[in-house]
Image (cartoon, rainbow, N blue to C red):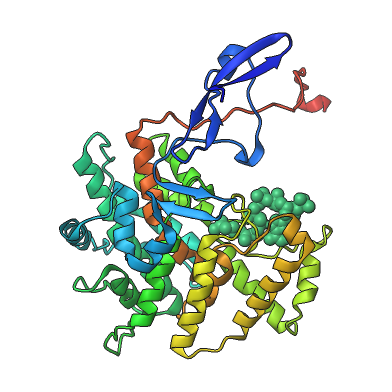
Amino acid sequence: MSDKAILEYDGNTYEFPITKGSENELAIDIKTLRSASGMVTIDPGYKNTGSCESAITFLDGEKGILRYRGYAIEDLAEKADFLEVAYLLIFGELPNKEQLETFHNDIKEESQVDEEMKKILDAFPKTAHPMGVLSSLTSALIAFNPAPVDVSSETAMYRSIVRILAKFPVLVAWTLRKKKGLPLDYGDNTLGYVENLHKMMFKKPNEDYKKDTIAISALDKLLILHADHEQNCSASTVRIVGSSHAGLFASLSAGISALWGPLHGGANQAVLEMLQAIEADGGDTKKYMGKAKDKSDPFRLMGFGHRVYKNFDPRARIIKKAADEVLGNLGIEDPILDIAKGLEKEALEDEYFVQRKLYPNVDFYSGIIYRALGIPTDMFTVMFALGRLPGWIAQWREMRLRGEPIGRPRQIYIGENHRDFVDLASR
Ligand code: ACO
């Protein structure tokens, strides 16, 4: 097999090396394209562009494979907990018992959020979308931790990573409690990471917190499944913002905004709202299948389709099973789950969806579990953000440690050519 690609244009020949990944993915390395030929590539939505080399997550969309640092998502979701997975993603290896304990203790040390932050939260109306609140609070944290991270120091990097892993769940819980009109809670450092999150979110002021093992283990699994997904919209945002050497928290805040959109993480909210609308409309799934296929109708079947997966999203398989288990264990019968299963069955047999290789994605069933756990619909994407936090951190850290250049794409200009200025009076 040749190790170079040849481009011929206008009587000239240009050669470019081929780069091979550890799973044998091939890429044409066009770093010298513009200086050699004067041309750039154009690829809206970066459908064919590898923006970086990365050792964090491997996914094969055709085969439906997802691995974090080489470990299958199925194994991690079954056998690991969220904090172990966070450590794995960020530092590259599964922690041993001692490393995990130190990591957790360091997180606990940093788990206070400055009281002044409450004033910022207070200024939001109760009706504010939780993703907007979370993004603002994450950005506001910078004011209380203003020192830039010295990326040449492993210790400084570690400290700032631990700091955000500690404070972010508090912000998530506060966002929910503000929405529900509950007093803010600081959690309990004797609890596990996800258990503490659960307590901070749900503890009632007039009752002792009761540990809910089903809810905690469901949350843990959902967070793991969302923890990274290589160069998706929000991870790419984090990398590109970080590439200007903006700090970690600023990059994360931008990532949260990118995740908010309904074509990305916001799909989990959109799926549930769609399922509720179908239920309210009499449960006629065929009608909505028709709308999804009608090109003159903007409606899309939310939770279906993926830029990379042209096969089952492995996370969707795990979440569908978990939805059955969690609802079963909690003794909940949710008609929305039946509507979702009905839609999935119809879509998988429908020529439109089959031809375009549209399968359920991670968000198709996750909202049903969140709903069963008592999490309001507009908080779903906030939960996704917490899950994705280690992935964003890992992507940012890798980008900075590799000394990647500032992200700055080119364009093909299609506007007006030079024109003479016309005075206001003459226009
Ligand atoms: N419902 C109906 N048709 C769809 C859907 C859908 N959910 N998704 C894609 N299609 C159709 C498109 O109309 C297009 O049809 P065409 O070839 O006849 O024009 C074809 O399938 C390809 O779709 P694109 O939009 O070109 O695919 P792209 O890779 O750009 O988009 C995306 C992927 C954004 C995820 C898309 O499938 C979608 O909008 N899905 C619904 C939203 C969603 O669930 N997003 C969450 C993704 S997972 C995540 O980010 C966590």
Which image quarter: residue 274?
Answer: bottom right
Residue beneath the point at 65% across and 18% down: 7
From this viewpoint, is residue 174 visible?
Answer: no
Q: Position of residue 375 (x, y in %)?
A: 47, 77
> Horizontal placement of 158 versus 257: left or right?
left
Viewer-proximal residue among 368 and 259: 368
Which image quarter: residue 333?
Answer: bottom right
> Horizontal placement of 124 versus 356: left or right?
left
Viewer-proximal residue among 57 and 392: 57
For the N terminus, the quadrant is top right
Say how many tags the image has.
0
Residue 80 in the image: above or below residue 287: above
Residue beneath the point at 51% across and 89% down: 332
For the C terminus, the quadrant is top right
Hey, which residue is sitting farthest front in the picture? 1
Residue 252 in the image: above or below residue 49: below
> Horizontal placement of 403 versus 356: left or right?
left
Residue 221 in the image: above or below residue 328: above
Q: Position of residue 414 (x, y in %)?
A: 74, 28
From this viewpoint, is residue 162 visible?
Answer: yes
Q: Position of residue 387 (x, y in %)?
A: 41, 61
Residue beneath the point at 61% across and 37% down: 48
Q: Position of residue 327 (x, y in %)?
A: 49, 84
Q: Quadrant of ligand 1?
A: bottom right
Viewer-proximal residue among 108 and 114: 108
